[in-house]
Amino acid sequence: MIGAEDIDFVSSTVEDSTEFVADFSVVRRLETINVLARVRRHVTASGTSIPTMRNSFDLIFNRRLSEKITASVGARAYQTEALSDSSVKGRSYIQLSGQVGWYFTPTFFGELRLTHTINDRGLLLGESADSNRINLWLVYRPNSPIAR
């Protein structure tokens, strides 16, 4: 997908702009493994209410281990930069994740995901932070292709 996003700033000191956005994905389905590679450029809001441009790359490997168990590992690298405030420094992130899913029934499954994120606030600031996240999801999909 390729397009443009029109950004209307509330502040009168910043000019409105139109930004190029894109999303390119490639999925390869093999007998036991699915691979997803995606390059994406999109506008997003930051925690400081300043619109940012985010460029990202994802690579995810997913494997069905048995009828009931799936596992995947993934990596994401992304970088953000402010569109309106030049005093806000861009950030670079690297995310590594792993997950295990268990199908209780063909339409109901649980998923445990572990994600480690490395956040670099720029070489000029010399700041960085790491975070770890654990998610447990219970999902009901009545129209799942597995249920058919």
Image (cartoon, helix red, strand yellow):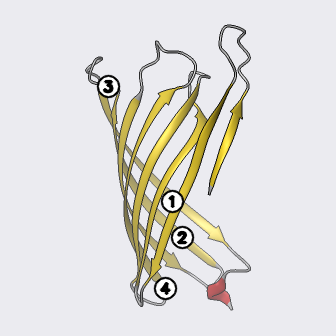
- Earlier in the chain: of badge 2 and badge 4, it is 4
Rounded to the nearest angstrom, the CA distance separating label 1 from label 4 is 17 Å
Label 1: element kind: strand
- Earlier in the chain: of badge 2 and badge 3, it is 2
Rounded to the nearest angstrom, the CA distance separating label 2 from label 4 is 10 Å
Which amino acid does the dot numbered 3 rest on?
Gly
Q: Residues within 10 Å of mark 4 (few under 14, many from 20)?
A: few
Rounded to the nearest angstrom, the CA distance separating label 1 from label 3 is 32 Å
Label 3: element kind: loop
Q: In percent of the image, x 60 and y 36: which residue is there? A: 44
Q: Are marks 4 and 3 in contact (CB under 8 Å)?
A: no
Report whether 118 appears left or right of 28. left
Of badges 2 and 3, nearer the viewer stands: 3
Quadrant holding the N terminus: bottom right
Q: Residue 122 carries which label?
A: 3
- Vertically, is 145 above or below 94? below
- Earlier in the chain: of badge 4 and badge 3, it is 4
Q: Residues within 10 Å of mark 2 (few under 14, many from 20)?
A: some
- Earlier in the chain: of badge 1 and badge 3, it is 3
Tell which of 104 and 64 is nearer to you.
Answer: 64
The residue singled out by tag 2 in the image is: 110
- Which quadrant holds residue 124? top left
Rounded to the nearest angstrom, the CA distance separating label 2 from label 3 is 37 Å
Which amino acid does the dot numbered 2 rest on?
Gly
Q: In percent of the image, x 59 and y 45: which residue is there? A: 21
Rounded to the nearest angstrom, the CA distance separating label 1 from label 2 is 7 Å
Label 4: element kind: loop
The residue singled out by tag 4 in the image is: 68
Report whether 12 appears left or right of 79. right
Residue 112, image x, y percentages: 45, 63
Q: Are marks 2 and 4 in contact (CB under 8 Å)?
A: no
The residue singled out by tag 1 in the image is: 136
